[in-house]
Amino acid sequence: MNVNQHTPMASPYGQPQPGYGQPGYAPLDGGYPAPYAPYNGPASAYQPGAQPQGPARGPPTSGPPPVSAPQPYNQYSQSQGDMQNGPPPMTQAPPRSAASQPYNQGAMNLSGAHPSYPQHYGPPPTMQQVTNQMTGMQITSGPPTPAGPGFAPTHSSQSPVSTAYSAAPPPSYTQAPPTSSALTQPPPVGATAASQQYYGGPQPPNQQPFNSALPPTSQQPFTSSAPPPPAQQTFPASSFSGPMPPPSQAPAPPVSRPQQSFPPAQLPFSSAPPPVSQPSFVSGPPSSAPGSFPPRAPPPSSQPGSFLPPGAPPTSAPSGQYPGPMPPQQQPPPSQPSPYHSPSQQQPPPSQPSPYHSGPPPPRAQMPPTPMAQSNHLPPGPLQQPPSQPAMQGGFPPQQNGAFGQVRGPQPGYAGPYPGQPNYGAPAPAPAAPPAQKRLDPDAIPSPIQVIEDDKAKCTEPFTTGVRGQAPPLVTTNFQAKDQGNASPRYIRCTAYNMPCTADMAKQSQVPLAAVIKPLATLPPDETPPYLVDHGEGGPIRCNRCKAYMCPYMQFIEGGRRFQCGFCSCVTEVPPHYFQHLDHTGKRMDCYDRPELSLGSYEFLATVDYCKNNKLPQPPAFIFLIDVSYNAVKSGMVSIVCQELKTLLDYLPRENPEVDSVVRVGFVTYNKVLHFYNVKSSLAQPQMLVVSDLSDMFVPLLDGFLVNVNESRLVIESLLDQIPEMFADTRETETVFGPVIQAGLEALKAADCAGKLFVFHTSLPITEAPGKLKNREDKKLIGTDKEKSLFQPQVSFYNTLAKECVAQGCCVDLFLFPNQYVDVATLGVVPVSTGGSVYKYTYFQAQSDQERFLKDLRRDIQKLVGFDAVMRVRTSTGIRATDFFGSFFMSNTTDVELAGLDCDKAITVEFKHDDKLSEETGALMQCAVLYTSCSGQRRLRIHNMAVNCCSQLADLYRNCETDTIINFLAKYAFRGILNNPTKAVRDTLVNQCAQILACYRKNCASPSSAGQLILPECMKLLPVYLNCVLKSDVLLPGADVSLDDRAYLRQLISCMDVAETQVFFYPRLLPLMKLDSGSLPVAVRDSEERLSKGGVYLLETGLHLFLWVGASVQQELLLNIFGTPSFSQIDSSMMSLPVLDNPISQRLREVIDSFRAQRSRYMKLMVVKQEDRAELIFRHFLVEDKSASGGASYVDFLCHMHKEIRQLLS
């Protein structure tokens, strides 16, 4: 993939991408971008070949290079070659060396200058910065001598350039601000002009040259490195810093840079206009804010265009971009691949790598082909790029296409990139420009939507698990899994499918080695559930030494009489009853007749040796404990629960739908005292027994408390009808909680069975009784070192109680209906430790919340669940499971104990090396879960997984899964806040992510300027997803987020699987303007910029559903969905959509139902009208934008991440 990616990168550069191309830096002020791009002009010089020769370069430079600039610039097309922002036609080989360095510079920018983005991190880069950046971009290295006077063609192109890059970039980049100006630096003057042009601003005279790509003026400044305006100068200096040849050289870089540079900052965003920069993004430097990003990156173009994959050779591509051919092309028709030319670029093939170039570098050759255009993958129009295409919409749209490049920069709409920008290029002044500064073009940075859509397109056949170390389709892709010896990805997903061979290599990369295991996951109807294997009284066949269960990794030897364990290599005798001859390949003749020899997942029937106290288990029991205090009765909760249970008792879990459930039930109500009910079938009326001594809880009856539903149905229904009447006039407001769980636990102990408690509770338990709590909510502690105490339980009582519950197999599910603080951090201890769940309905109102509560309750009662479970993860020699995350209890370091384990619970396991691994044997893991089924049968469920091992870091980075890494990092962070300040936890996350990406850049990406942000193909979404984790309510709460909400989310996410964390952190946003009966519309990126006033959008987070309605939606659509022609008449308080007889209404309701069916919790629908107060809540989930609580936008964070990476590399 990487390869692909690279290519795009180039393109991004090259292409002008809308706006973006031009400035290259778009970011800053926007103006930049254009100029930069123009710079490209000289790029042709870039042509790798040309590279060295300055003059030659000039010529290529697109003919115009020189002064002709004017012609070219043309924003996009103009320089095409020239600008070459985009990747050059790939044909040429870019001169990667110099170029890349320069690029750096830009990249640097990234970090510093981001200003460009607007919001981004820092102030906008100064013009100088920009210039610098440009220079960096140069990447082509050979830059166009001709292009600008400044450029020293020859030498410059060569090495100098690169040095330039490096040196400069960092500085400039960092500075981002004016100094950075380098970035902004007006690219050479000429450049600026260009950009202005681009934007429409006036171009300064110099600039025109721009076109020339850095005609004298502009380049000259550059060239002179110092000479140019200060800004430039800055740039040169650093950029050149290296040997950089004469100033000319410096200029050159700029030139090329532009192309790549795409506007660095802009790069991604390049604010709208200058998409070009986006590609840059790859580089990521935000230096100028926008530019910054791309800035350097692009240059490296060679690299992978910043994004390009290491193969990046692309870099050359970019430079090549212009490649010889380019010159002419440069300004030529957009159609050319010319890097610039955004248009073509835009549409380049998606396959292209993203500018990002995340991913392994593609072969250079490849790059070239990708003509920038494609790389960018922009849409046809130059600026059009438009907001990424829908599909790509994700910023990356084609994502690989270098979607980065995509830069939305100058969307068609925007005339100049940023109107004000004209100045950009202008010489240095521009610091001011920054304001205008464009941000990276969001379309130019990696887009989650593009990655998701590309994966869906790639997945045309069933995923077979027989190939070791093969990464599965993403969780967002619908696929069919076929078990051929490894567990389905529905049961196990790994962060890396190529494990490092040594601990040192793992430490160097910082990539977490973990697996997210969902042992009882529900499979789709077209997949076969695990087979149940019964080996009789002898029980399952196991290794004598490590006790691993028989699996496909066991090697039979000596004619089948013994087997060698794949985990510990111990040789074990095969029991006579299990003996089978081997075929000519050494496999048993019955290999494919036995699930345990040919499949990754299966179950064994456990013998009495695997049971507690060596006796077979009793069927489990469900006990319902209902709060009947004033608040519970008044809210309607009590009557709703009682009414619903009459129906639900017919749906208790069972494995065979034809047979009645064997689960027994019992009932308790409570406020300050507990009321037990005798519902024995022989009674005419239920009997109530009250226990008021709460200090020593006991169950006042044995016979008649736990009963079979069918035998006692009449008595149970009578009780459920009477409870709401009995407590209708209660004035008791206080409640207890600890004794309630103790009561259920004692009842299960008395019946000698495992089971589940369903507790319906409303308020903080302040009554004098075990487990009493006080209100400790203190907003003043938020953000201080004492904040962590708020996530820890108030008292140790519940930890002790949880331990007792686990020992008995008593799982607790807690349904909370709070109107104020109830201390979820403490009340949730028992549910979380027992493998249970917490459901929270704040300010519960029967009318609006009844549906959500009842759907959750029904699913919770009906879903398949195992009791009294113990899970152990065994691994082959060399690694071991060291840490576990989820809802469970551990009394030792190896056994994960779960009183209850249902089909929604996932456990994340981290592995560490304790020895070396070998590439030949790979690494093996076996997850074994011993549990009691809901029918009372003791079973062992086995999941096996084999992954490859690698001695090269490039192989590790080629086979990771970002969604799983984010699942691990989120759980790691959310546990970390129990003992550390949230700021320290956030900093740790950012640092680890920067180390992962810096290690890749240093060891796997082809050499390129530091200015480039280079991401591995399979991790190009790591920054955007990590930013979503950092901005989550748990780590960065807004003023309106309660402590209970944060504790609730922290507990909830700790047991989520990968699909749930993916949609929770990066919600799905679907445009509904064109709903057809077939496939779903392609999602758009989570940003307000993507919403159209004339549109209707559905946003799903896994916990919430929002239907956002634009203020100017067509009447026909409003009639079809809401049954009203007027926006003002839409009732935003509606709970569900009206059932209307038209295809759009039917299809929308089907979509909503299908979304709900995929999630473990019922998502309540909220209608949000544009400009309505509720829009604040909706915007909270537009995670690519800045958050109200201070969280960075995606563009700003990408720039920040690039800065962190540069610091690590320097």
Image (spheres, rainbow, N blue to C red):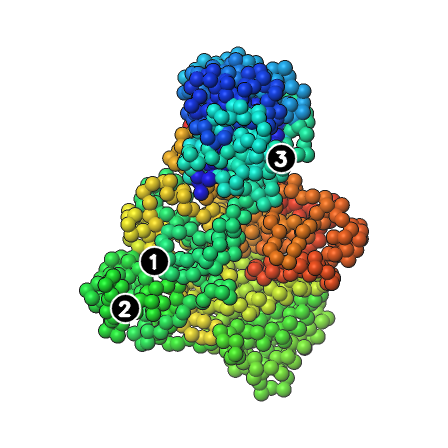
- As rendered, which of 1049 and 262 lies closer to the eye? 262
- As rendered, which of 1112 and 838 lies closer to the eye? 1112
Of callouts 1 and 3, which one flags the residue occurring earlier in the amino acid sequence?
3
Is disc 1 placed on a helix, strand or loop? strand
Q: Is residue 337 visible?
A: yes
Q: Mark 1 belongs to which amino acid?
A: Arg
Q: Mark 3 belongs to which amino acid?
A: Gly
Looking at the image, residue 85 lies above or below residue 974: above
Few, some or many residues within 10 Å of mark 3 (<14, 14–19, 20+): many
Which percent across, then down, holds residue 795? Answer: 52, 56
Q: Quadrant of residue 715?
A: bottom right
Looking at the image, residue 218 lies above or below residue 587: above
Q: Mark 2 belongs to which amino acid?
A: Met
Q: Are marks 1 and 3 in contact (CB under 8 Å)?
A: no
Location of the C terminus by quadrant is top left
Q: Which residue is mark 1?
A: 874
Of callouts 3 and 2, which one flags the residue occurring earlier in the amino acid sequence?
3
Which percent across, then down, holds residue 625? Answer: 58, 70
Q: Nearer the viewer, mark 1 or mark 3?
A: 3
Of callouts 1 and 2, which one flags the residue occurring earlier in the amino acid sequence?
2
Kindly identify the residue that appears in the image at 40 percent across and 32 percent down: 1006
As measured in the structure, the alpha-carbon distance from the residue carrying label 1 to the one carrying label 3 is: 56 Å
Q: Nearer the viewer, mark 1 or mark 2?
A: 2
- As rendered, which of 234 and 782 lies closer to the eye? 234
Few, some or many residues within 10 Å of mark 2 (<14, 14–19, 20+): some
Q: Which residue is mark 3?
A: 381
Location of the N terminus by quadrant is top left
Is disc 3 placed on a helix, strand or loop? loop
